[in-house]
Structure formats: structure tokens, C-alpha cells
Amino acid sequence: MFDTILIANRGEIACRVMETAQAMGVRCVAVYSDADRAAKHVAMADLAVHIGGSAPAESYLRGDVIIQAALDTGAQAIHPGYGFLSENPDFVEAVEAAGLVFIGPSAKAIRAMGLKDAAKALMVKAGVPVVPGYHGADQDNALLAAEAGKIGYPVLIKAVAGGGGKGMRLVEAAVGFQAALDSARSEAKTAFGNADVLVEKFVTKPRHIEVQVFGDGKNAVHLFERDCSLQRRHQKVIEEAPAPGMTAEMREAMGQAAVTAAEAIGYAGAGTIEFIVDGSDGLRPDGFFFMEMNTRLQVEHPVTEAITGVDLVEWQLRVAAGEDLPMRQDELGIQGHAFDARLYAEDVPKGFLPATGTLTHLTFQQGCRADSGVRAGDTISPFYDPMIAKIIVHGPTRDIALSKLRAALKQCEVGGTVTNLAFLGALAGHDGFGAGDVDTGLIGREIDTLTVAPDVQPRHAALAGMAALGLLDPAEDAGFTLWQPLLRQVGLTWGGEDHLLKVQVMSSRKQIWHVDGTEITALRVRGGWQVGGQTAAAVAIHGGQVTVFDGYGLVFEVIDPLARAAGGHGDGNLVEAPMPGLVRSVDAVVGQAVAKGDRLAVLEAMKMEHSLLAARDGVVAEVLAVAGDQVEAGAALVRLEAAAEEGAA
């Protein structure tokens, strides 16, 4: 076994690898960027090396610097985690040329599966079923359109070097094909440096089921399947293992196909064979098709670990150190059911827009597994994926595991940034999901019911007011004049509206609040407060923001009268950057007439491209940014004026 390894990654996966490696007595070296100087993975490591600037291209994608850091610190091997350089065959070869071990598959295996078109050709040769589509090298627009017509709409355009939903577009009819093709190519070029695409038939009730494989270069086994059908924008949200409705016959067929695929390329290490499954008539052995292979450890690997009892990172280290597979296929089995929910800093009502912010408060349910690369006090950076944690639960049955997931989500507390926690809670409570009736279109169909605004009750607002005025722990004489209780007030904003709350502090143990015409009594009892007759939830306050941890976190903004008196800003005609990022392109031209919904610019942030659209009809008055600008959140990019103003005297 290795004495020292370097983890060429950051965040949650770097922490996850260190937990197992250090438990095995292996010394761990972390690498970090400017933005990650105080990150959790740096604190966990036995030794940490600074490798460059905050942007991935200046740090985590600098293979030569990472390899030198490994050599300088005495590491014998490099674990790539996932993302960044994990599936870069040139990096693998450079690692090996430096006399180090790459904890993962060979460069040859990565190249064989790295491009979706070549991988599918290889799978056809190996007898693995594939989705009908065009995977050729000829990328002529007219040819691709013609092939889409032959396949039959709807079709999916997918980047051949893609992953994570980037460079992927669903096209419902021929009229939208060219625009979707241009958009997919642009995003693929940005994300992967390769604009080539393939075109495939879109399965109308698709389920995304993947099989975990593991090889030692000679033999391979599968560790059963995961259902990853709950997706938004082609990115996974909640995963589970095993797949609901799976039959023994289909599990055997899928598992054998996955092992065949792995052994066809002499695979070593952890990998995932992803299948698209036709769920329109139940799960059938002839109803699954190879999509792609991920030649690395997957984000959702914990659910497989939960049902098999296998530590996949330990297996990675042991096989990379030259050992054979730790277990045979007949020694592997399924115990119970597991779920994995991905908690992100993102604004769900705004189209799952990635968010930034400082985590002023972060706690998870005691006893549940929460894989996280951040702590309270850490900042969600615009440079990297905004995942906060993976919340993993396991139970003897699917129903029990799902009940545990719902409880774990309700008891998760995050303050300082918007999150998708309420969305995850709604999804976990969805009747269709509860019954196992899932497909990749469920979130899209049910988005309105899954994103209902939180129910803020007067007692919640009163509790937020108590925090804002410092009345959660008042002194014995707090709020009193000589003769009577003092009436105080505080302004709070929630649901996009301002509210004025008033309170009479009767004593250190009793307060009477008035919230939008409703009287709420707060009483201090043994163990805490009762507000409106119910035990008060936990509260976190930071600056002008109060979070009440009920209903997955209710956020209130404290109104600062002095700031309001200073006046607002802007005239409603500015198109602003919703987050820090790189201006990828500017479509607006001064004097151009635009309609509501027209694209004015494209902002690249958190590894995704975001189109900025005109909020109303008008004329472009000013263009305030150019392609290549790095802008902060709120930066003005384009200013519009009413069309009637054009040509006015």
C-alpha cells in the first residue's frame, strides 16, 4: 500500500478520499487554489500545497504543477477525484511518466470511453445495446439535420466529450434543430474544448439507470445499479440504489452488459456504465441502451457503498497498489435501500441559478451521512460547482429509507445563501416519486408543484423579529419604561414584500407581537421559546438576514431605514449579471430594437452558460460590457430604453 498520496481535487470529493485513505494509514497531500486557502480539504490534509489562482485553469487543471507537488511531497500516487483532470488521458500519461501511480483507469481505457461516439462504436462491437443515433465524425450542419430526421424527433444533441448536462440540447421538431445545434456546440467548446456532437433518439419516458463497475485490469465485477432519473437540466438531483421496479432478469442483463463493457477495455478501478432505459412499459431486459461510461468515481457512489457495504475508495487504493479485486461477483449482494440528495447553493425559482455566499450556519441531522467540502463560515465561490453537501440515508426497505431522507432534509439547516433544500424536500415528498414512478421528465412536468413558495406564518415572522431585535435572550428589564412595556417595531422583507412588525416586551419571558393584523404571543419556557403556541425553531442571523429553520429555512431581510432613505438604484431597464462570472458573448448592439425574451448576453459562471434575456420590449441604449470581461454580481451589462423614446426630440 502507498505511504503517501496526493488528491488532485478539492471540496467534497477531496475530503471523502482523505477520510478513507487516512483511516488506512495513508498520508494525504492536498492541493489548493487562492480561493481555497482556508478550505475544509486543506484543513483535513496532512500537508497542503498551493498551486495557483482561483480559476480552475490557473490551479486544478494545471497537471504539471500538480505532478510536481506530488514529487516534492513524496507522494507515490495521485487520486484525481471527479471532474477537473480525472478523465484526462494526457494527465494520466504524465503522471506515469513522472514515476507516479494514477489511482484510476489507464489512459487507453479513458480514451476508449472518453468520446461518446467512439465509445458507442466499441459497445456495438462488444454486443452491448446502444440507442439509435448518429455518432459519425462528419459534423456538417446539413448532414446532422438529415440524420436527426432519419432518427425521428424528438432527438438529443449531445457533446461527444460531454458530461454533466453540458453541451446537451433536446430538440422537439426540425424547426428548432439548427439553433439548438449552435447552442450545444458553443457550450461544448467552452466546457470541453471540443465542439463535436452526436445525435440520438430521445426515449419518451426515459429512466437513467447506471451500473457501478470495478476492474483490476484483468477482471471486472458490478456492484449493482443506481437510479438517477430525477434530473433537472440533465443534472442529477436525487439518486437511489437499487432502482425501483428492477427485476432479477433485468439486473442480470444490465450487470452482465456493464461487465462486458469494462472488460472490453481492460478496465482498472471504479467506473460507471450509464444506460438510458425505456420505462414506458416497465423494466424489461430488452429495454435498456448504453449511453456512456464515466471512467472515474461518481458523485453518487455513496448509495452503492450503503447497499453493498463496500468502501469504493478503499478498493481504488488497493487495486491501484497492485492488488486483485477484493471480492468476486458471487460475494457481492444488496442490503436494503439508499438515497443520496444533492444539496446545492442555487436559486430554484430563478431557474436553478447557481448562488454564492458565506455559509453563516450549517448543520445536518445527527446520524445521517453528509459528505461535504464546506463548513459554517466557508464561502461558496463563483469559481467552482456550488454543491454544499450530499445527504445520504440507508434503510432496510425503500419506504423506510425514503422516510429517513425526508427527515434528514427537514433537519438540515443552512444559512447565508439560498439553497435547493425546499425543492429537495418537495421532491422527496412527491407521490409519484414515493411510489417509484420516476423518469427523467418528472421534475420538468411537476416543476410548479415542486417550487411552491414557502408558507411563512405570523409565528415565523415574529421569531425572525425577535432575532432581529435581539430579544431571543433579553435582560430582565429589557423593553421597559418606568410605567409600562415599551412598544418596539422592526421592518422585515419576505416573499418580495415589506412588513412592519410591532412588539410589546412584557417581561424577559413574555412578548406580544403584531404581524399583519395577527397577535402572536411569545413565551419563554423551560428549554426555549414557544411562539404562537408552538416550540420555536432554530434561528440564525448574519448581518441583515435572519433564517428561521422551519419549512427548510425561511429567509427574512431586516429593513434598514437609513439605507431605504438613501433611495433605490437603477430604473428597471438594466440587464445585470445575476452572479460573478465571465461575459462569454454580447449579442446586444446600441440602437437595436429587442423584444421581451431576446438574448442580450451570455454569462459563464460555475461551469455553465447563462443567457441573459430582455425583460421587456425596448431599444438598446448602452452596451456596458464586452466579451471577455470578468464581472461581479449586479454589474450592469446592457441598458434598455422604451421603444417610443427612439428618435424623440
Image: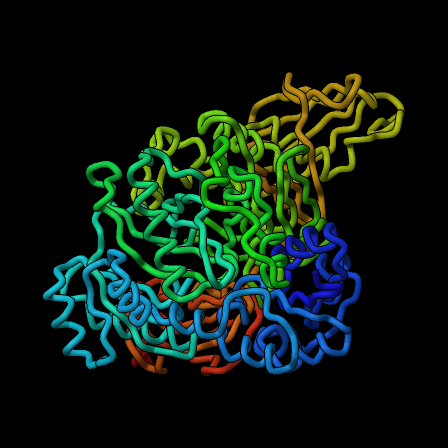
In the rendered image, the vertical position of residue 604 relative to residue 244, given as above or below: below
**Residue 514 x, y percent position in the rendering:** 63, 26
Q: Quadrant of the N terminus?
A: bottom right
Out of 390 and 254, give the one closest to the viewer.
254
Q: Is residue 451 left or right of residue 65?
A: left
**Residue 46 x, y percent position in the rendering:** 79, 62
In the rendered image, the vertical position of residue 587 relative to residue 173, given as above or below: below
The answer to whether residue 86 shows anywhere in this view is yes
Q: Quadrant of the C terminus?
A: bottom left
Residue at coordinates 43% horizontally, 69% vertically from top-left? 109
- Which image quadrant for residue 531? top right
Q: How many marks?
A: 0
**Residue 21 x, y percent position in the rendering:** 70, 55
Q: Is residue 625 left or right of residue 491?
A: left
Residue at coordinates 70% horizontally, 45% vertically from top-left? 361
**Residue 17 x, y percent position in the rendering:** 65, 56
The answer to whether residue 621 shows anywhere in this view is no
Residue at coordinates 49% horizontally, 69% vertically from top-left? 87
- Which image quadrant for residue 494? top right
Residue at coordinates 73% horizontally, 71% vertically from top-left? 75
Out of 536 and 544, give the one closest to the viewer.
536
Colour scheme of this structure image?
Answer: rainbow
Q: Is residue 109 left or right of residue 56?
A: left
